[in-house]
Image (spheres, rainbow, N blue to C red):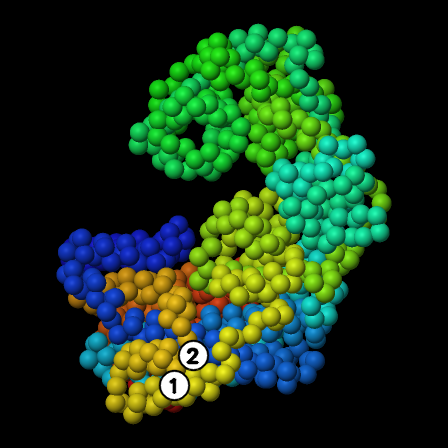
């Protein structure tokens, strides 16, 4: 084994480890593979970059755009809706028709695009026919992937396999070479799912099992009724006359005001500028624990207790000054995005920027180099930040400076925790009260009135007294929130909060959304869209509190509430998919026939062998734009750049495996293990290995890795490379056992309420069914 082979195996092994663990994004791993091969000299620089100009990569991104044109002109929607409305009320028949319709469309469209297109249609059909969507959405995803097996352009692995054959000197696969095996797999998959597989599907989902009529949204599934309350505003409350935004009910307590019951009228979905009036009854949704905790606090100005606050500050409260280091990564980020408190239990009491002292609104302060932070906490924890290069120049702050420079004596309160002290830490540290009102506990009084430093985790007992930093201007507002009366009166049903103009709906993040990984706070969701997120359904669990800090993920379902025109607006956003057809209409239905003609027009010369597929696809894009079927901005948006970079980055690895002999070595291993069963044993072994790897590796990356191994195994065993490569293509594209390696599976995970185990339970038998069908049909259509 040569040094080059060892290096290739090392790079391959690390890449597989990163694919399986998910420590880095797959496209980043692919780019690291590309760079590693070039830096080690295993392949030349021009070979490392060859993937970006590879015809397979060009064809892949071109097909993404052509699929978008069929979507924008409504071709696929027309087909899908008409086919689905032919279904009766039987679940088995509906399952079969969903899979067939998505499969037919996926033969010429991107799999993920088909699923995104059909999601609202299937969701509405499920409600109308009293069927849990969890019984239909996985068949939708699986049908799209099975349909992709039927043509050369149906899925990227098919294209990559064909170009790999061409690059190795063999005849590439033609447009319909995949059809016999693919159609057989599609039909077998449909029959299996309709008769047997659907019984393995769960019945839990993000849609109500009790309200199945079209357009009625499923509050019960999100358990919202248990999280809704009525709060009464007292006649003398300081909240009267303030807007909802000023009240900080949402920002401070995490409570969504869904309606205001006022005299004989009810204001649904009140906006942030709605003014609160005396005797209003606020219909709120959220976790009421923070409010209950607040109602057991008493905030007192120290002078009212005859306390000398200046004398208190002379005690050791572990308050230090530290400078944001010159190369600190803290510079440029908001204070609330740091992990001082959560990780180290450190409080930031003030920021000194060139003599300007900032004591309130600190959460929104963007830190600069050389800012002086007034920190409270143990010195050894500050040392950790200093060793990390975050801060330097840590100095114990003398009491006179705390008073003269920082004027802390003006922003300190005494808080009595009169009851249920267990809620205190959660309310201050884990809820939003601390950040919304700038409340920070810095000391706790002992029984002898000695003041000791407070840090997160300190045990709080009933009747304890704390020293708290806050804003005196917020004191009336805090008292007003404390005085809200939690009514025992039966809370109106969630459905009473909906009308013709105001509704609940579900959305999922689109596969190519730029919002993935961002929080609702970061994207200013409420302000931007005018809608309220009530709950998030993630991996089979409902989340209803602290939603603003949860990074969004592709495929999870968000329950949103607001005006119908706002729901229609978010439906037009490319970052979201609305799970109902209340407004989803293609923008250029008049161009449907034109787009079909263009699509047929570019495929005919490919079938006749006049032009390569990559050239025909690029020409098709130009024609789609020139004929008005698609805009260039939509074309750019349609490209799944992660897949493009993934494929382009992994292609050099295939080249390196062939050039160094690593592929031959792996192929020898496959032949040694499976060769005992003859040539078809080798084919079955390659198929089985590929299927196993689909659990964690993207199909496109997988075929790039497996192609050179299959070609070398075919050569060494003397069998047709087309047979082995066809097996690899079918196995790689049949991704049923995992939600992480294919976006189509991930997209239905949230709306269907699926868990990882659900994909295993139904995916394993379906994978075996497709494998058996492929192994039976390969000798007929692709003999050795």
Q: CA distance from mark 1 to mark 2?
A: 10 Å
Can you give x and y, in whole percent of width and height, for residue 215 in the image? Answer: 69, 68
Residue contact at pointers 1 and 2, CB within 8 angstroms: yes
Q: Quadrant of the N terminus?
A: bottom left
Secondary structure under the numbered disc 2 in the rendered image: loop
Q: Nearer the viewer, residue 781 or 90?
A: 90
Residue drawn at the location 29% of the way across and 92% of the way down:
608
Q: Quadrant of the C terminus?
A: bottom left
Compare marks 1 and 2 and give the one earlier in the sequence. Answer: 1
Which residue is label 1 attached to?
A: 598
Pick whichever, 769 or 475, lies toward us.
Answer: 475
Q: Is residue 272 above or below residue 210?
A: above
Does residue 540 appear left or right of residue 235 in this picture?
left
In the rendered structure, the answer to whether residue 587 lies left or right of residue 425 reads left
Identify the residue shown where x is 49% and y is 61%. 575
- Apparent side of residue 143 relative to residue 234 in the rendered image (left or right): left
Residue 84, image x, y percentages: 61, 81
> Which label belongs to residue 703?
none
> In terms of depth relative to the viewer, which is nearer, 467 or 179?
467
Could one spot residue 100 in this view of the protein? no
| Dot 1 crowding, Cα within 10 Å, few <14, some 14–19, many 20+ | some
Quarter of image, res 666: bottom left
Q: Residues within 10 Å of mark 2 (few under 14, many from 20)?
A: many
**Count of residue discs:** 2
Residue 179 at x, y percent in the picture? 41, 86
In this view, 343 is above or below 641: above
Residue at horizontal 39 percent and vertical 50 percent from the top: 23
Residue 445, percent from left and from top:
63, 14
Is residue 553 visible in this depiction of the protein?
yes
**Where is mark 2, residue-wise?**
629
Foreground tag (1 vs 2): 2
Instruction: Report whether 490 appears left or right of 326.
Output: right
């Amino acid at each position: 084994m040569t040094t080059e082979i060892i290096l290739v195996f090392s790079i391959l092994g690390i890449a597989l480890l990163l694919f399986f663990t998910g420590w880095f994004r797959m496209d980043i791993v692919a780019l690291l593979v590309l760079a590693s091969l070039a830096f080690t000299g295993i392949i030349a620089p021009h070979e490392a970059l060859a993937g970006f100009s590879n015809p397979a990569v060009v064809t892949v991104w071109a097909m993404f755009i052509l699929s978008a044109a069929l979507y924008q002109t409504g071709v696929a929607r027309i087909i899908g809706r008409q086919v689905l409305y032919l279904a009766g009320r039987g679940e088995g028949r509906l399952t079969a028709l969903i899979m067939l319709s998505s499969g037919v469309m996926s033969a010429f469209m991107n799999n993920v695009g088909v699923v995104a297109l059909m999601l609202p249609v299937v969701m509405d059909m499920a409600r109308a026919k009293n069927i849990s969507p969890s019984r239909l959405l996985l068949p939708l995803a699986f049908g799209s992937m099975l349909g992709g097996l039927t043509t050369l352009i149906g899925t990227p692995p098919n294209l990559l396999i064909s170009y790999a054959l061409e690059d190795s000197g063999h005849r590439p696969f033609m447009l319909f070479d995949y059809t016999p095996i693919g159609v057989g797999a599609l039909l077998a998959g449909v029959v299996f799912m309709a008769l047997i597989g659907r019984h393995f599907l769960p019945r839990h989902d993000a849609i109500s099992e009790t309200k199945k009529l079209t357009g009625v949204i499923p509050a019960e599934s999100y358990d919202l009724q248990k999280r809704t309350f009525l709060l009464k505003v007292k006649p003398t409350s300081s909240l009267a006359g303030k807007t909802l935004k000023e009240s900080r009910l949402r920002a401070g307590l995490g409570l969504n005001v869904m309606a205001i019951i006022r005299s004989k009228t009810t204001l649904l979905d009140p906006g942030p500028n709605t003014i609160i009036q005396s005797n209003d009854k606020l219909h709120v949704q959220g976790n009421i624990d923070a409010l209950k905790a607040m109602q057991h606090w008493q905030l007192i100005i120290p002078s009212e207790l005859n306390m000398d606050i200046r004398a208190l500050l002379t005690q050791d409260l572990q308050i230090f000054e530290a400078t944001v280091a010159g190369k600190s990564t803290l510079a440029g980020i908001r204070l609330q995005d740091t992990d001082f408190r959560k990780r180290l239990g450190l409080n930031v009491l003030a920021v000194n920027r060139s003599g300007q002292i900032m004591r309130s609104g600190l959460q929104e302060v963007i830190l600069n180099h050389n800012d002086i932070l007034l920190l409270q906490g143990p010195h050894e924890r500050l040392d950790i930040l200093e060793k990390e290069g975050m801060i330097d120049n840590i100095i114990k702050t003398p009491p006179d400076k705390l008073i003269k420079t920082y004027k802390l004596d003006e922003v300190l309160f005494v808080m009595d925790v009169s009851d249920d002290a267990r809620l205190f830490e959660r309310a201050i540290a884990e809820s939003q009260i601390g950040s919304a009102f700038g409340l920070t506990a810095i000391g706790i009084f002992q029984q002898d009135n000695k003041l000791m430093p407070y840090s997160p985790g300190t045990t709080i007992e009933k009747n304890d007294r704390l020293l708290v930093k806050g804003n005196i201007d917020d004191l009336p507002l805090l008292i007003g929130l404390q005085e809200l009366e939690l009514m025992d009166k039966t809370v109106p049903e969630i459905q009473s909060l909906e009308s013709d103009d105001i509704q609940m709906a579900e959305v999922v993040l689109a596969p190519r959304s730029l919002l993935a990984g961002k929080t609702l706070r970061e994207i200013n969701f409420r302000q931007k869209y005018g809608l309220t997120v009530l709950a998030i359904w993630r991996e089979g669990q409902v989340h209803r509190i602290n939603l603003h800090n949860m990074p969004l993920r592709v495929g999870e379902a968000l329950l949103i509430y607001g005006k119908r025109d706002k729901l229609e607006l978010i439906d037009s956003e490319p970052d979201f998919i609305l799970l109902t057809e209340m407004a989803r209409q293609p923008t250029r239905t008049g161009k449907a026939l034109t787009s079909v003609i263009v699509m047929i027009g570019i495929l005919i010369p490919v079938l006749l062998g006049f032009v390569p597929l990559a050239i025909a696809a690029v020409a098709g894009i130009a024609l789609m734009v020139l004929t008005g079927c698609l805009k260039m901005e939509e074309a750019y948006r349609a490209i799944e750049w992660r897949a493009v970079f993934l494929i382009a980055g992994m292609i050099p690895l295939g080249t390196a495996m062939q050039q160094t002999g690593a592929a031959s070595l792996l192929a020898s291993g496959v032949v040694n293990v499976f060769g005992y069963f003859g040539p078809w044993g080798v084919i079955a072994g390659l198929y089985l290995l590929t299927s196993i790897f689909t659990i964690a590796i993207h199909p496109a990356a997988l075929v790039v890795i497996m192609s050179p191994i299959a070609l070398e195994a075919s050569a060494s065993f003397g069998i047709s490379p087309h047979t082995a490569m066809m097996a690899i293509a079918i196995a790689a594209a049949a991704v049923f056992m995992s939600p992480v390696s294919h976006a189509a599976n991930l997209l239905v995970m949230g709306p269907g309420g699926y868990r990882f185990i659900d994909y295993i339970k139904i995916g394993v038998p379906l994978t075996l069914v497709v494998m058996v069908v492929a192994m039976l049909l390969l000798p007929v259509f692709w003999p050795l």
